[in-house]
Image: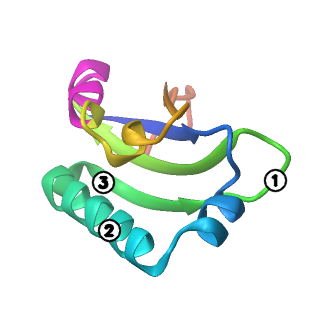
Amino acid sequence: MSKFLVLYRSPVSAREQLASASPEQAEAGMKAWQSWAEKAGPAIVDLGAPLDGKSDVTGFSILQGDSRASVDELLADHPHRHMPGAEIDVLEFMALPGMEG
């Protein structure tokens, strides 16, 4: 089983997204993420968190799967994809010789 770093990118910072959302929008967003997380189940190593900084990377997760294709399939209808201008990058962790375990 391989691990994958999932980077959530958006033209609007996570801080701005949180500040501009109404309580109803924030609740709907959390429900969408919770629903996705339930569907993803054991593929989630770390659900992650929003990120703050001078980058378009606004959050991350760590997932595991048998292949990149299986992770891509899991992310196909991820709630982040429903945001205008949002993108998701998936990077596979590389095993280093002598560092397995």
The amino acid on which the numbered mark 1 sits, given as a three-letter code, is Gly
Q: Mark 1 sits on what residue?
A: 53
Residue at coordinates 24% horizontally, 48% vertically from top-left?
43
Closer to us: 39 or 82: 82
Decide which of tag 3 and tag 1 comes sooner along the chain: 3
Closer to us: 11 or 73: 11
The quarter of the rendered structure image containing the N terminus is top left
Q: Give the overall secondary structure of the magenta segment.
A: helix
Q: Mark 3 sits on what residue?
A: 44
Residue at coordinates 40% horizontally, 60% vertically from top-left?
47
Decide which of tag 1 and tag 2 comes sooner along the chain: 2
Residue 26 relative to residue 34: left or right: right
Q: In the displayed image of the protein, which residue is found farthest to the right? A: 54
Magenta stretch contains residue 58 = no
Residue 69: image location, x then y, percent: 25, 19
Query: Is label 1 in a helix, a strand or a loop?
Result: loop
Query: Is label 3 in a helix, a strand or a loop?
Result: strand
Closer to us: 18 or 49: 18
Residue at coordinates 63% horizontally, 49% vertically from top-left?
58
The amino acid on which the numbered mark 3 sits, given as a three-letter code, is Ile
The residues colored magenta run 67-74
Crowdedness near tag 1: few (<14), some (14–19) or many (≥20) residues, C-alpha within 10 Å: few
Q: Mark 2 sits on what residue?
A: 28
